[in-house]
């Protein structure tokens, strides 16, 4: 029991005193962390560099083993792959630009362009934009109508032909005389 109170007193005294550090200690800790981060980044960069170099060597060795005809076919195949990649990128940019233009023409936000470009076909995109535009317009119209819709007055002010019509009451006073 005495040990528990002694431990509790030690815990209480350590919680009451805040830990303070000097500027030199803080600078030293910051320098250590920065050095560790730089070392990690350097190691990672060197590993990537070594892998790229190894890949280049293996590609060179593979090409060296090929005959001239095989080399020319392989080079042509790589060139064609690069051209196909560039063409795909250009098509994606063109599709993105045309989609944004279509959205602006329809008065819709261009934030939808990224999602629509994923469809990949201009006709599908156009149909999706039409559907989206109609859906948004219908929703907006419904909300506007619900906001503009009011309840009829409860005090009978709109019943002009009734017995409570103030004009009829006034006219009745003149007719009696």
Image: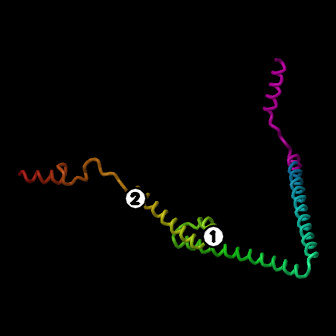
| Residue 17, magenta (yes or no) | yes
Mark 2 nearby-residue class (10 Å; few <14, some 14–19, many ≥20): few
Residue at the left extreme? 177
Mark 1 and mark 2: Cα distance apart in space:
37 Å
Span colored in magenta = 1-28
157 or 76: nearer the eye? 76
| Residue 122, magenta (yes or no) | no
Residue at the top extreme? 1
Mark 1 nearby-residue class (10 Å; few <14, some 14–19, many ≥20): some
Q: Position of residue 98 (x, y in %)?
A: 60, 75
Q: Which residue is mark 1?
A: 120
Q: Which residue is mark 2?
A: 145
Q: Secondary structure at mark 1?
A: loop
Q: Position of residue 102 (x, y in %)?
A: 55, 73
Which numbered disc covers residue 52? none
Between discs 1 and 2, the one toward the N terminus: 1
| Among the 4 quarters of the image, the one containing residue 86 | bottom right
């Amino acid at each position: 029991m005495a040990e528990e109170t002694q431990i509790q007193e030690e815990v209480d005294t350590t919680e009451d005193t805040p830990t303070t550090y000097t500027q030199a200690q803080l600078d030293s800790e910051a320098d250590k962390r920065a050095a560790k981060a730089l070392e990690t980044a350097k190691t990672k960069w060197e590993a990537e560099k070594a892998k790229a170099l190894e890949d280049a060597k293996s590609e060179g060795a593979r090409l060296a083993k090929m005959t001239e005809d095989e080399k020319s076919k392989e080079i042509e195949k790589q060139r064609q792959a690069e051209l196909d990649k560039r063409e795909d990128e250009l098509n994606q940019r063109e599709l993105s630009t045309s989609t944004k233009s279509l959205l602006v023409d329809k008065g819709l936000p261009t934030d939808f362009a990224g999602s629509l470009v994923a469809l990949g076909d201009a006709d599908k995109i156009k149909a999706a934009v039409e559907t989206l535009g109609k859906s948004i317009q219908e929703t907006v119209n419904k909300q506007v109508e619900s906001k503009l819709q009011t309840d009829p007055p409860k005090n009978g002010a709109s019943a002009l032909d009734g017995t409570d019509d103030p004009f009829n009451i006034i006219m009745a006073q003149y007719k009696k005389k």
